[in-house]
C-alpha cells in the first residue's frame, strides 16, 4: 500500500512510559544517548544525515534479535561486543505504528513496515512525524515477530518528557 502523506498529519499522538533496552557496541558503550550510528547510517524511521533516532526495544530478546538478525545480518557477534543498557522513558507525543488503525490511516500494514532491511519508511513515515514534533514512534520489530521497538527522536523530546539511560546491565553476548 502507498503511504498517504496527507493522512500522516492526522496520526494520533499517545504517551508512553516504561523501561526499554538497547544494545550498544563496546566502543560507544559510555555514550548511551548517542545517535551517531543512526545519523551516519540511517534506520527504519530516521533519515541519514538529517535527524537521528535512539532505537530501543521493549525487551532484551527483541534487542538481541535486532542486532543479530538486523545489524549483523546473521553473522555471529564476538563475545562481549555489545553492552546492554536499560532506559527509563516517559514521552507525551508518540505515534503507534503497532496499531492497525494508525497504520490503516496512513495507508500501510504492520507487515509492510516490518520487512527486514527495508528503510523506505524513514522518509515516508519518519520524516513527517519528526517534522510534526513527534518525540518518537512504536513499531513492530522487523527481526522478532512478536517484538516491539520504541524509536525516540531525541531532538524533539521536550519537558515534561524524559529519556534517561539508567544502567549498564551486562555485556553481550556472553563468552
Image: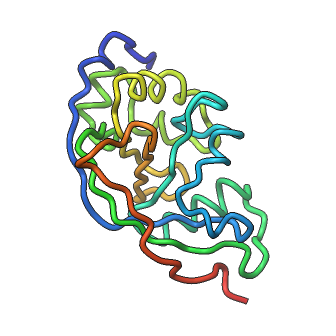
Q: Residue furthest front?
A: 159
The image quarter containing residue 3 is top left
The image quarter containing residue 70 is bottom right
- Asked whether, in this view, residue 79 is left or right of residue 142, the answer is right
Quadrant location, the N terminus: top left
Q: Nearer the viewer, residue 63 or 35?
A: 35
Q: Is 94 drawn above or below residue 24 in the view shown?
A: above
- Asked whether, in this view, residue 161 is left or right of residue 163, the answer is left
Q: Residue at x 33, y 19 (%)?
A: 8
Q: Is 84 drawn above or below residue 66 in the view shown?
A: below
Q: Residue at x 74, y 67 (%)?
A: 27
- Asked whether, in this view, residue 91 is left or right of residue 53, the answer is left
Q: Residue 88's spot in the image, x, y percent?
A: 34, 65
| Count of marks placed on residues | 0
Q: Nearer the viewer, residue 125 or 159?
A: 159
Q: Residue furthest top?
A: 6
Q: Residue at x 52, y 64 (%)?
A: 22
Q: Residue 135's spot in the image, x, y percent?
A: 35, 39
Q: Residue furthest bottom?
A: 175
Quadrant location, the C terminus: bottom right
Q: Residue 31's spot in the image, x, y percent?
A: 60, 63
Amino acid at each position: 500500500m502507498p503511504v498517504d502523506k496527507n493522512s500522516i498529519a492526522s496520526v494520533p499522538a499517545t504517551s508512553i512510559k516504561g523501561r526499554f533496552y538497547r544494545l550498544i557496541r563496546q566502543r560507544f558503550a559510555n555514550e548511551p544517548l548517542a545517535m551517531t550510528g543512526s545519523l551516519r547510517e540511517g534506520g527504519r524511521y530516521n533519515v541519514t544525515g538529517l535527524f537521528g533516532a535512539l532505537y530501543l526495544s521493549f525487551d532484551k530478546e527483541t534487542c538481541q534479535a535486532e542486532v543479530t538478525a538486523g545489524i549483523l545480518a546473521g553473522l555471529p557477534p564476538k563475545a562481549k561486543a555489545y553492552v546492554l543498557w536499560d532506559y527509563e522513558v516517559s514521552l507525551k507525543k508518540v505515534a503507534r505504528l503497532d496499531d492497525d488503525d494508525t497504520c490503516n490511516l496512513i495507508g500501510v500494514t504492520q507487515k509492510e513496515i516490518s520487512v527486514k532491511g527495508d528503510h523506505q519508511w524513514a522518509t515516508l513515515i519518519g520524516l513527517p512525524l519528526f517534522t510534526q514534533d513527534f518525540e518518537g514512534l512504536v513499531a513492530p520489530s522487523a527481526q522478532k515477530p512478536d517484538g516491539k521497538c520504541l524509536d525516540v527522536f531525541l531532538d524533539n523530546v521536550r519537558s515534561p518528557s524524559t529519556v534517561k539511560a539508567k544502567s549498564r546491565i551486562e555485556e553481550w553476548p556472553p563468552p
